[in-house]
Amino acid sequence: MTLPDTPPRPAGTDRTFQVDLRGLVDLLSHHLYSSPRVYLRELLQNAVDALTARRGLEPAAPADAFGIRLYADGRVVRVEDDGVGLTESDVHTFLATIGRSSKRADQIAEQRADFIGQFGIGLLSCFLVADEIHVLSRSARTPDAPTVEWRGRGDGSYSVRTLPSSARPRPGTTVTLTPRADAGEWTRPAQVHELARHFGSLLRHPVTFDDGAGGTGGPGAPVNPEPAPWTRTYPTPGARSRALAAYGGEIFGFTPLDTIELDLPAVGLKGIACVLPEAVPAGRRHGHRVHVKGMLLSEQAEEILPEWAFFVRCVVDAESLRPTASRESLYEDDTLAAVRDALAERLRAWIARAAASDPDLLARFLQAHHLAVKSLAVHDDEILRMLLPWLPFETTDGHSTLDEFARTHRTVLVTSSVEEFRQVAAIASAAGLGVVNGGYTYDRELVHRLPEIRPEVTVADLDPATLTAHLDPVDRETELAAAAYLAVARDALAVFDCDVALRTFHPASAPALLVDSREARHERTRSQLAREQDGGLWGDILGALRQEAPRAQLILNQLNPLVRTAVTIDEPELARTSAEALYGQAAMLSRRPLRPAESSLINRSFLDLLAHALRKDS
Ligand SMILES: Nc1ncnc2c1ncn2[C@@H]1O[C@H](COP(=O)(O)OP(=O)(O)OP(=O)(O)O)[C@@H](O)[C@H]1O
């Protein structure tokens, strides 16, 4: 918009804004529309709105009486409709006034919901591909009005003239564009046909396309020969669901695991949700295809479903969703919020039905989407109640559902990290305890909620320290006999802040257990830093945070034959090496990342033991 450069006028004089059309078109193309191809969507949408208004005038006309005809031969693109048309005064008021829309006028405000357009700027998108828009129109409201011709140019000028009725014998509007050379990509006949199918495949009025190859005036190829698949009738329910799945497959490019029908009469919404056959990264939202009154508005609408529904992609056609001016997203209003809630409810009902009566479908669904469902169950009590017993968890009995697991373990123990689970799993299961790995996202929280739906089950946290406190101590005599070895081992492992103890536990095949939580390791790293920085600013800060640094603990298993032999070694060097080797093996078993000092310890102890074995043999 530019303000005219005129001399100052007396205060209080009204002036009129001037619009710099080129600047406006530039704004639309760079900031509103995703691609120049939207010009065809806007032309189609205007034609659809005009047909809607015409039907309002002539409700008794046969269903296929009014249609839309597209023509593109490489030189021109033409969109012709049998819509309500325009009088000369309409042309001045609506076509030539940017931001003015006949669909927003007060007298038909209550009908606003009937139209897709409302902003009065859509036609400008034609300037993305052409320098001039040519419109020929004849009004159905005023049948004896002459045909009116309007030429609007990208420089902001326009001309209007009336022509004899014979120039357009029937009511309706024809918009013709002569594309610029640089817009060939969007205006080639094949591309126009493709775009028409893309945007208009579900339009309810007959739309045809003609590329002029067989001479003009032919019937043209149908753009939307079939109505939307969910509005058709099928011989059997099976045939219906196969057809819907095939449609989903065609537009999304995957075979849906299942197809959920969507139907919300309150907003005239129908469509399908296709369940993705494979997992998607949690939180990654897929766009849904949203049609309004048949017209494809957005392929990337995220807002019609809540975030948790990332296991489906939907295609819907709605009567009364309001697109934004770009058309590529939806107005966040009460209707949209209600639609989102209602669709979410529909997905929940599908999950409930699968859980209650289709175990095979449920199993396939959970195999692909258990992570999504877990994230959902954390916040949604109903989903939790329906699905928690079916969700897979890593347990000391292998991968198992909580229901299966709780059948053998009335007390379910759960660790808070994967590492802790690795540390305790073998010992706990040898002791007959049932432990679930709670280290993965949501798992611990979900396991703790099991008693809400299975009140007979008790859930408790298990950490390695609790477990070791319950390991059986060895008798005094054994302890004394091992004292010298334990002292050497403690000395060897002091660099890792690791204590060494002797206990008895099952399985006897496990020589040692390294109990070391992540928090303890962090605390030790922090204390070490504080010591290194002693006196400096950071030393003071880190020192002020100092807590009792929890120590790691290497627990040797007195039931293990190797340990029984090790504790009797009287050669100090060999005792030290064996303690280091036992530590290294226990650290590796916990599957946490090894620190460089631990890797070199494992390396060194292995070579020392090898050298020792070879010396003995020679
Ligand atoms: N094919 C048509 N038949 C009849 N009237 C039309 C046609 N195309 C455009 N018009 C008139 O021109 C006006 C402006 O059209 P334009 O596409 O710029 O805006 P809109 O459709 O009203 O709103 P939006 O910016 O949301 O598309 C319309 O409101 C309508 O009155």
Image (cartoon, helix red, strand yellow):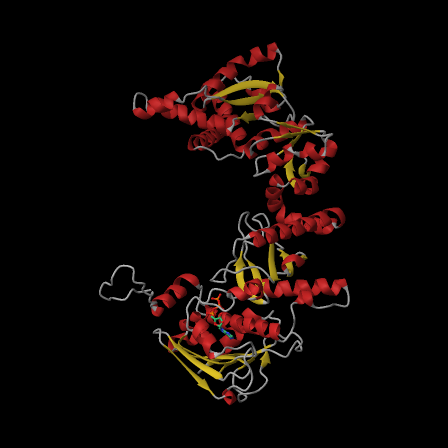
Q: Is residue 166 above or below residue 130?
A: below
Q: Is residue 579 above or below residue 406?
A: above
Q: Nearer the viewer, residue 197 or 147?
A: 147
Point 30% across, 24% down: residue: 537
Q: Nearer the viewer, residue 287 or 530?
A: 287
Point 50% across, 76% down: residue: 192
Residue at the left extreme? Answer: 7
Query: Residue 287 placed where, x, y %?
Result: 54, 57
Q: Is residue 539 above or below residue 230?
A: above
Query: Which of the image's four quarters has the N terminus?
Result: bottom left
Query: Residue 342 placed where, x, y %?
Result: 64, 51
Residue 320 appears in the rendering: yes
Point 65% across, 51% down: residue: 347
Point 33% across, 22% down: residue: 540
Q: Is residue 485 above or below residue 380?
A: above
Residue 545 falls in image quadrant: top left
Q: How many marks?
A: 0
Query: Residue 275 placed where, x, y %?
Result: 64, 55
Residue 114 falls in image quadrant: bottom right
Q: Nearer the viewer, residue 568 or 312?
A: 312
Q: Nearer the viewer, residue 43 or 261?
A: 43
Query: Residue 266 placed where, x, y %?
Result: 65, 57
Residue 29 falls in image quadrant: bottom left
Residue 197 appears in the rendering: no
